[in-house]
Image (cartoon, rainbow, N blue to C red):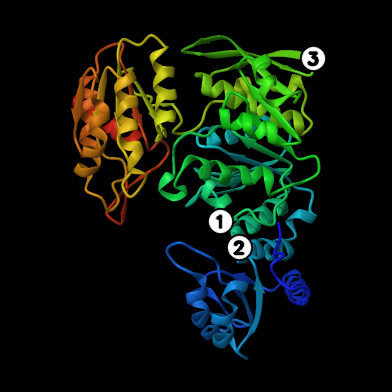
Amino acid sequence: MFLFSGSHSEKEKVRGVMQFETLLEKAKKGLVVRTDSRKIQDGECFVAMPGTAVRGLDYIPNALDNGARYIVAPEAARDLVAPVVEKKAVAVYVDNPAVALGELARAHFQVMDRDLKLVAITGTNGKTTTSYIIEHLLASSGLKVGVLGTVNYRWPGFMMDAPLTTPDCWMIHELLFNMKKADVDVAVMEVSSHALDQYRVAGLDFDAAVFTNLTQDHLDYHGDMETYFRAKAKLFSEYPRLNKAAVLNYDDPYGRRLLAECQGGIGYGIGDASLVRQEVGDKPLVQGRILSMTGQGMEIETSWKGKTWVVRSPLVGSFNALNLLAAQAVGLQLGLNCKDMRRLSTFPGVPGRLERVMNDKNLDIFVDYAHTPDALDNVQRTLAALDFKRLITVFGCGGDRDRTKRPLMAASAARYADVAVLTSDNPRTEDPAAIMDDARPGLAGAKRVMENPDRTEAIKMAVAEMEPGDALLIAGKGHEDYQIIGTTKRHFSDKEAALKAIEEVYS
């Protein structure tokens, strides 16, 4: 990671480095750094972050009014910033304020100077489940584990709901600092493509990084799949560390690309390893083979460096086999052995990830977070293989998000569901009916379609449709306990809605 590019003169670079090194020393001694000008207090440092909707540059006057003593701003905006700052504060110019914030946070909290191992997980699907499996594997092996993820931020004795999959840079360093104060040995982080693109993990060194897969998502932000991939790839190309384990899914084409590119790459998968080696060469591989899979779970044979062992798990689905292999690969890199892997047999599963809704009517109802076409394919394929009489799928698409995936979501439901129930997800500021209109073309060829823009009513319709032996999948929200309608976040839980529907239908 660099702060000053070759476009500067040598004199400018030396001056910039000296100024920033002085700021780093002050951060080590307790200088507080903020990116929200409203929270600035006397003597603090304000970093003018780049942005899409808002720019930190526009809030420098407010930061100065609130007592900022130091302003970190982009070199490209020097001519704009200098007259505003004048003699009111010390201005430090860098190429990338987001990277500078990471270095300042690193100096302030000194997390990297402590004995805390960091594991990062990126990919479109599987991040949360993989983080839970790694946490279980390491914790049951005697290590103290912390997790920063989609569901919450937690470690022994602490838990808070997660507003973002990956929080802002300063908060990440602060959370890791607090983990280490609580004697956490390993921190496991989900790292989103937005976070990587915005350098929210700047200033961190990772001991292991996992790439699960890449399928269409977030194109409203990234624009195209290659840009999306390159954002994910930053975790492996721009955060180098000697001996860092890059754990990469070789069953995924993008994973194979990374495996070929990464010097320290370790592949994992259940596909034919001989074919993979034609693309990636002689890279070490954690190879899996599904021995059996029923409604009660699966058995996986795992091979690594001449050793083979069997893992039994209550999870189902080939995607979960891959998640289990990723966790094993990380565990092996952190010093566990093949005997430790038997502890995966006691992993109960993840909230909102193919979570069974227990009920007194013995209805087979599952809640899952699947909100991409690939994820919806995977979870439906898993349930369809378990010999249920019919599969009923409730799904919707988010508002103010990638419109191109809406008909793809519907097409996924049409492929697998005997009854596809189209409804709302988080409509946000869009008209739910318009979102459903976008999705509806994908339902051409569906066996049967039901529609209701009210998610509560749609779930009730689906429950009422169930017959003995059917499986009902409620997809899209998983663990979330809210629905965003307009700009208002309202309490809503698919699990609660399903239980309420059972009560009303069977009353």
Q: Is residue 435 left or right of residue 132?
A: left
Residue 351 x %, y %: 47, 34
Identify the residue position indicated by label 1 in the image: 198
Classify mark 1: residues with Cα within 10 Å, few (<14), some (14-19) or many (20+): some
For the residue labelled by badge 2, is the local secondary structure a helix, a strand or a loop?
A: helix
**Which kind of residue does numbered mark 1 sit on?**
Gln
Question: As shown in the figure, which amino acid type bears the numbered disc 3?
Answer: Gly
Residue 193 drawn at (x, y percent): 53, 46
Which of disc 3 and disc 2 is earlier in sequence? 2
Q: Which residue is mark 2?
A: 98
Q: Position of residue 129 (x, y in %)?
A: 54, 32
Q: Nearer the viewer, residue 36 or 214?
A: 214
Is residue 360 visible from the viewing direction of this image? Answer: no
Residue at which label 3 appears: 306
Q: Residue 282 falls in which quadrant of the image?
A: top right
Label 1 close to label 2 by CB (< 8 Å): yes
In the shown orientation, is residue 245 left or right of residue 276?
Answer: right
Query: Between 431 and 331, which is closer to the camera in this rendering?
Result: 431
Position above or below: 473 against 120: above
